[in-house]
Amino acid sequence: MEVLQMGLRFNKTIHLGKGLELQLGKNGPIIKGGVGKIRINANKRGIKATAYLGKTGLSFSKNLPLPVKKKENEEERIEIVSKNTVHPFFKRDIPSELKSKVYPLQSILGIIGILFVFLSFIDLLLLFIGGLIIFIHHIWRKKTSPALVAYKNAYKEFNSKKYQEAIESLNIVLKHPKADPALELVKAECLLELDKPSQAYELYAKFFNEIDPVSLDSITYWSPKANAILLSIQNNNYDLALLIAESFPNSGENTDFRLWKNYFKGLCFLGLQQYEAAVQAFQTAVGKRRNMDEPFIDCHYFMGVAYTYLGKSTLANKRFQRVYSANTQYKNIGEIMNRISEGESIIDIIMTKN
């Protein structure tokens, strides 16, 4: 039974003249106004301008959000590489192990109920009987197969971006003794979508410590593996990050696993202050290719950082110059090059940046 919740609402409109109105309500003040066929709404979230095109019934809207000031103590996070909308191990088809022995009988009952509803044009009594059968079918299945019902709900919630609800449904599924442990990775991705990286990291760490990453197909598990590596690096768990990175093959048809494998290893060695190993890993990742898209440009940048800590300023400068030539807006490369041109040593610059 649904509980209908009611609350008090406050709404007050003040006319300011010349088509302007000030509305005071629960969500804060809103200013409305306009000239001719152009209307403007302004609230605490931003400004929305709408232009109506004559008598066509068509309109064009433009949202101008207000700038959000970043908190001074907010740390820059490692960017998540990839998020799948549907995982290969999280499909619409319900896993057979979650189905009870009476599942086929329940399916037949459901079909009979739908048939009765469909034939209700003959007699309205059939509509009542069909609805009753479908209701019994639903209650029976929910009682005998709670994990199955929860799986269906989780799939719908995940694809509807209702991530908290999806987590709650997945928790019910995972209580089933035959549930796929990989569903924990779907929960981790939900947590990333909810901007809870620390909780997501705990799930990734638990999963990959219990299951050997080598046993998991790198194409199927690309997104969880990549995200787990970056979150492990962010949490200084370099052993786990290297373990997962080493599970990537050295080749792939659609994904350049050799590139990503060595890029991730380079980040780990950089965090471990093993700068020679970091340079070697980044060099292996880049090879002889001149591509400066991500993560190639990242490899050159972090190679420059590693060279800096090795005291090889000339080699570091060459890497930073290459990054700057490719993208002047990349990270803080503009400031680095300006300070180098002013005669400041590279090591002093990098030390103040890291």
Image (cartoon, rainbow, N blue to C red):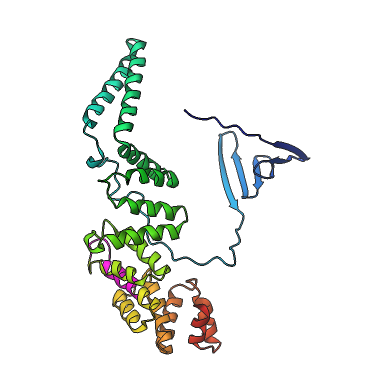
Residue 31 in the image, given as x and y percentages of width and height: 69, 44
Image-based side of 229 in relation to 164, left or right:
left
Q: Choose between 221 and 209: the one closer to the eye.
A: 209
Image-based side of 85 in relation to 64, left or right:
left
24 shown above or below 184? above
- Where, by quadrant of the figure, is residue 153 drawn? top left
Residue 300 in the image, given as x and y percentages of width and height: 38, 77
- Where, by quadrant of the figure, is residue 185 drawn? bottom left
Examine the residues drawn in magenta and state their main secondary structure: helix
Q: Which residue is drawn at 43% across and 56% down?
A: 192
Q: Which residue is drawn at 48% across and 72% down?
A: 331
Image-based side of 340 in relation to 199, left or right:
right
151 shown above or below 247? above
Q: Choose between 135 and 111: the one closer to the eye.
A: 135
20 shown above or below 138? below
Q: Choose between 336 and 200: the one closer to the eye.
A: 200
- 260 in the magenta segment: yes
- 21 in the magenta segment: no
Q: Which residue is drawn at 26% across and 58% down?
A: 219
| Residue furthest right as drawn | 17
Image-based side of 92 in relation to 315, left or right:
left
| Residue furthest top as drawn | 123
Q: What stretch is highlighted in magenta?
A: 252-266
Residue 252 in the image, given as x and y percentages of width and height: 23, 64
* Number of marks present in the image shown: 0
- Where, by quadrant of the figure, is residue 41 drawn? top right
